[in-house]
Image (cartoon, rainbow, N blue to C red):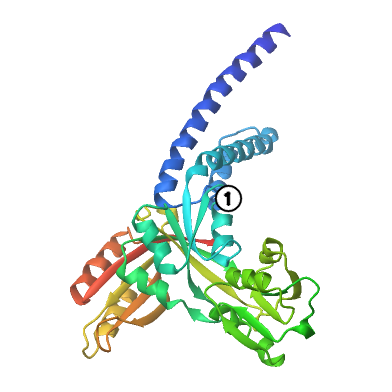
Amino acid sequence: MTEIRAGISEIDAQMAALFEKRMKLAASVIDIKKELGLPVTDPEREKVVLQRAMDNVQDTNIKEYYKLLTAKMMELSRDYQNRLQGGMRVGYSGLPGAYAYITARRLYPSAQLIAYPDFESAYNACVEGEVESVALPMENSYAGDVGNVLDLAYTGELFINIMAEYSIEHYLLGVKGAHTSDIRKIISHPQALAQCGDFIRIHKLATEPTWNTAAAAKTVADKGDPSVAAIASKENAELYGLDILEKGINSSPVNATRFAIFSRVQNKLPENERNHFFLIFTVRNECGALANVLNLIGSQGFNMSNLRSRPVKGAMWGHSFFAELDGDLESPEGKDLVTQMKAICERLVIAGNYKRVIL
C-alpha cells in the first residue's frame, strides 16, 4: 500500500508541474487573442481538443473520465484567461444595453467595454489603439445592410476577424406602470423602427428616431412620460428601470444582426478553421467587368455566400462590391484568386479572414 501511495504522489507531482506549464501556455495565448481581437472561448477548438484527449487514452473504461478531466482543465484555462483578459478593451457604438454592447459582452465577458457615440468614432478608436477590437453591426436579416459600417470596411485599415450572428428580439419598454394602450410615440434606432414596422402601423404610433436603442430606453426613463415607449432589448428594462410592455414585436420572427469584430491585425487562422473571407473591390465601368470577377471567383471553386454594392463616395456613379466567400484565403486557390483579382479590379481590399460565431 505504501508503495502504491508513493507512486500516486509522484504522479500527482508530475501532473502538478505539467498543469502549471499548461496554464502558463494558456496565458501566453491570451496576448495573441488580444492582438487579434479573439474571444477566450472557442467551442469548435474545444471539441477538437476533447476528441484528441479521448484518442490518447487506450483503456475504454477510463476514456470518459479523462474527457471530464480535460474539460475541467479547459474550463480552468478559460477562467484564467478571462482574468488576464480583464485588461482587454473592446469598443462599441451606443450605450450599455445596446445590441453591440450585448454582443461584445458575450464574446468578451471579462473585457473592459468602451462606448462611443457613433460607428466612425468607435472604428477610429481601434485604429488609434484606444481599444484592441470594436464590435459594429454589419447587416440585419430584415432591414438590410448597415451602410456606414460597410463604408468603414472599404476605406479603413482594420480587419474583420469574427462575424458574430446575434438573434434579436425587440421589446416595447415603458415607464413603470405604463400600458401598451397608453403609448402614443415610440423612440428607437431607425433600424429597430423598421424591424417593428407592422407593430407600429397596427397601433398607429408616432415614431422618433434616435442614434441607438439603448439611448432610446434611457430617453424614455429620463422623460418619465407614460405615453412614450422605446424599442430595445430586454436587458434595457433592468438597466434603465423600465417595464416590459410587449415582447417579440419584430415584424419577422427571423431577425438577426451580424456584428463584425474589427481588429488591427489580420487573423491567421489554423488551417482547419480557414473557411470564410471578405473581399471588397471596384471594377472599371465597362461591359462585362463585374461578370469577369464573378466568373473568376466561381472558376477558383469558391462559393460566394453574399454580394452587395455601395456607392463610392466622391466617385460619380461608382460602386464598390462586397463579397463574402466560403473557403480558405490562404490556400493556393485563394492566393491565386487574389492575384488575378488585383489584375482586373481597380481596387481590391482584403477586409478579413474570419470565423463565424452564433451567439
Q: Is residue 314 above or below residue 156?
A: below
Residue 327 makes an appearance in the image: no
- The image position of residue 313, as x and y in percent, is 29, 81
36, 204: nearer the viewer: 204
**Amino acid type for the residue under numbered disc 1:** Pro
Q: Residue at x 40, y 63 (%)?
A: 123
Which residue sits furthest top?
Answer: 2
Neighbour class for label 1 at 10 Å: few (<14), some, many (≥20)? Answer: some
Q: Residue at x 74, y 78 (%)?
A: 226
Where disc 1 sits, the SS reads: loop
Horizontal side of 15 relative to 272 (left or right) equals: right
The answer to which image quadrant residue 124 occupies is: bottom left
The answer to which image quadrant residue 307 occupies is: bottom left
The answer to which image quadrant residue 191 occupies is: bottom right
Image label count: 1
Horizontal side of 349 relative to 212 (left or right) equals: left
Q: Residue at x 52, y 32 (%)?
A: 23
- The image position of residue 356, as x and y in percent, is 49, 62
191, 174: nearer the viewer: 174
321, 186: nearer the viewer: 186
Horizontal side of 214 relative to 123 (left or right) equals: right
Q: Which residue is mark 1?
A: 109
Horizontal side of 300 relative to 165 (left or right) equals: left
The C terminus lies in quadrant: bottom right
Q: Residue at x 70, y 87 (%)?
A: 184
- The image position of residue 16, as x and y in percent, is 57, 22
Residue 341 makes an appearance in the image: yes
Q: Is residue 98 above or below residue 53?
A: below
The N terminus lies in quadrant: top right
